């Protein structure tokens, strides 16, 4: 028995409806593929350029940086920006942080009339409010500047507690030279008031 359509309406058979939908989907697919632009990146060839080996000085470079302290870490590495997952860190400084080493003067050899041997005097204050300092000097005249400890009045000035502050015309013992040097300390820069 054939289907009869109501007069004035357009009848669509189920099979015809299915075929129209499939054809529309295929047309949309073909149009989408034509509109898609494929960009092909050119292959990059790896070029290895020889970078000149220059000595770059950082605060973590104890060989090339004269202001890096001569401290031995004994193979221990603990990144300063990493937190301890176990809880509160130990051995925290409670009396202020260490200041940076800076050149505070020069050392000249006392004996033998040899004024040609001038060494830098590098130091930092151990704690604010105390006159205890840590000092060291460096060898001169070679490519490898070695940091040398200084003894002031028989005390090692590189230890944890430091030594008394060195003033001009003080005699200090430099370990690498096995000799006594005379210190000349620079004048300190004081705070100045700048009115607005």
Image (cartoon, rainbow, N blue to C red):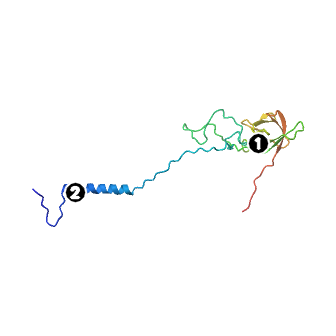
The Cα atoms of the two marked residues, 2 and 1, are separated by 92 Å
Q: Quadrant of the N terminus?
A: bottom left
Q: Residue furthest right?
A: 113
The answer to whether any part of residue 96 appears in the image is: no
- Does 169 sit left or right of 126 as displayed? right
Image point 84% across, 36% down: which residue? Answer: 180
Q: Secondary structure at mark 1?
A: strand
Q: Counting other residues with Cα less than 10 Å from the Cα at mark 1, is it few (<14), some (14-19), or many (20 or more)?
A: many
Whether residue 22 is visible here, answered yes or no, is: yes
Q: Give me the disc on residue 122.
A: 1
Q: Earlier in the sequence, mark 2 or mark 1?
A: 2
Residue 190's x, y, as percent? 77, 52
Image x and y of residue 186, in percent? 81, 47
Residue lying farthest to the left in this orientation: 1
Quadrant of the rendering where the C terminus is positioned: bottom right
Using the image as rendered, state which of residue 132 and residue 110 is in the foreground: 110
Residue in view at x 79 percent, y 42 percent? 120
The image quadrant of residue 135 is top right
Residue under pointer 2: 17
């Amino acid at each position: 028995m054939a289907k009869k359509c109501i007069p004035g309406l357009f009848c669509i058979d189920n099979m015809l409806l299915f075929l129209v939908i499939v054809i529309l989907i295929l047309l949309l697919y073909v149009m989408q593929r034509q509109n898609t632009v494929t960009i092909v990146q050119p292959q990059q060839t790896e070029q290895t350029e020889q970078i000149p080996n220059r000595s770059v000085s950082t605060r973590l470079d104890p060989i090339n940086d004269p202001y890096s302290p001569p401290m031995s870490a004994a193979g221990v590495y603990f990144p300063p920006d990493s937190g301890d997952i176990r809880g509160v860190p130990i051995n925290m400084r409670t009396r202020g942080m260490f200041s940076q080493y800076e050149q505070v003067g020069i050392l000249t050899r006392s004996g033998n009339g040899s004024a040609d041997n001038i060494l830098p005097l590098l130091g930092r204050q151990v704690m604010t409010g105390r006159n205890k300092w840590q000092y060291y000097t460096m060898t001169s005249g070679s490519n490898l500047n070695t940091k040398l400890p200084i003894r002031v009045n028989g005390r090692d000035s590189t230890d944890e507690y430091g030594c008394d502050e060195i003033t001009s015309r003080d005699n200090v013992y430099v370990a690498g030279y096995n000799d006594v040097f005379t210190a000349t300390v620079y004048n300190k820069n004081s705070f100045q008031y700048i009115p607005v």
